[in-house]
Every structure is written in structure tokens, then in C-alpha cells.
Amino acid sequence: MKYIVYNQKGEKNAEEIILPKEIFEVKANPDLVHQVFVSQMANKRQSTAHTKDRGEVRGGGKKPWQQKGTGRARAGSTRSPIWTGGGVTFGPRNERNFKKIVPKKMKRKAFLMILSSKAEEKSLIILDNLKIEKPKTKEILSILNKLPCKAKNCLVALSEPDKNLFLASRNIPKVKVVEARNLNCIDLLSFKYLVIQKEAIKKMKETFKK
């Protein structure tokens, strides 16, 4: 597949890049992508919410009143769930495990499917280079605004870590800069556009080479 390459001024280069078929021409399977996305979201989830049951609540060792003769309902402990300050019935517990295991081949396939759909929908923007001299937000904004994404809802993938680009993009809403090797299905599906350096595609080709 031939694809347009832009420069930092937003101009189209004379030469087009040929995208590798094994990465950018993978047949879509929405069910597989959904399964991988749900599993990755579940694996990020943390079990922080926790309620104490009647065995963990402090106190309640003494019987509140005698079993018979008071006219009141029988009670064995003040820590019963029906008492104020007692344990919680069926509340959230921090030992719950949300992790879902998905084979690596399925994750890889879903990842390539999303990249292919980005290329097919023209939501993939390839830059010959991306460099700024100072970590200034206005510098990266001026570059992104010249591209088809217009600095709106875009994920920028770099071939190598660049501190200036990371710092400059922190304050821009709906713009995220990552290394290409750290791309995942969640990030790709969370942003409409993928802005990627030309060199990063070469590295991806080496990584996903069969």
C-alpha cells in the first residue's frame, strides 16, 4: 500500500512510502479487537474498594442482651450487618481479581487490525521527521495544526524517546506522545489519528516480522 508522507510544515513529500502488508493490510475482526480491548482494560483495573464484613469490624464480642425475657429480637453481636456500624453484606472486596488472559498472538493480531483500519480510514499520518528545539507547547502545536489531524484527538508515536516532545505535549488536551514500541490497542482506539514517524514504521516492521 502506497501512503503519503508529510514534513513538519504540513507539506506532502514527492515520494510516497510503501506500507508493509503484514502490518497495514490485515483483515479486520471486530470481535477479536473487542475481546483484546476489554482484557487490557480489565488488566489495568485495580481492586481498591474494600468493605469489612462482620468478622473484620471491631467490637461486638459481648452479647448485647440476654436471649430471652427482654421482649426484643434475639441479637448475638452488635457487628451484625443489620446493625449500624456492623459489617457490610456483599460489599466490594479488594481480593477480587479482574485479570483476563489473552494469548500473545491474539493481542498482536488485534493490534495490527487497528493499525490497518487507521491506514484504510486515512487516520494514519506519517511524518518524515518530528523534532523541536525547545520543549515549547506552541512549537509542537504549530506542527500538528499544519497536519490533517489539526492537533485534535491524535496519538503521536516516536521511533526514539524525545524529552522535548514529551514535555511540550503534556498540556495539550487529547494529544499524547508515546514511543512506537509502547503502542497498544487501548491507546490506538482512544485516539482518532495516529501520527507516526517514518523511522518508527521500519522498527515496527522488524518487530512484527514473521
Image: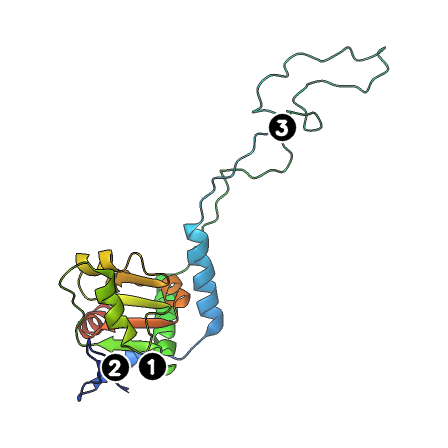
Q: In terms of image quadrants, where is residue 124? A: bottom left
* Residue 43 seen from this side: yes
Q: In terms of image quadrants, where is residue 201? A: bottom left
What is the crowding at mark 3: few (fewer than 14 residues within 10 Å), some, or many (at least 20)? many
Marks 3 and 1 sit apart, C-alpha to C-alpha, by 56 Å
What is the crowding at mark 1: few (fewer than 14 residues within 10 Å), some, or many (at least 20)? some
Give amino acid for label 1.
Glu
* Residue 100 seen from this side: no
Q: Which residue is mark 2?
A: 19
Q: Which residue is mark 1?
A: 25
On the image, the x and y values in percent for residue 199 come to: 17, 72
> In the rendered structure, are the residues bearing label 2 and label 1 in contact, judged by CB atoms less than 8 Å apart?
yes
On the image, the x and y values in percent for residue 16 come to: 21, 86
Name the residue located 29 percent from the left edge and 56 percent from the top edge.
170
Q: Which residue is mark 3?
A: 87
Marks 2 and 1 sit apart, C-alpha to C-alpha, by 9 Å
> Does 70 appear above or below 90?
above
Q: Quadrant of the C terminus?
A: bottom left
Report the residue that reaches farthest toward the front. Answer: 138
Give amino acid for label 3.
Gly
**Element under label 1?**
loop
> In the rendered structure, are the residues bearing label 3 and label 1 in contact, judged by CB atoms less than 8 Å apart?
no
**Lower sequence index among marks 2 and 1:** 2
Q: Nearer the viewer, residue 85 or 37?
A: 85
**Element under label 3?**
loop
**Lower sequence index among marks 3 and 2:** 2
What is the crowding at mark 2: few (fewer than 14 residues within 10 Å), some, or many (at least 20)? some
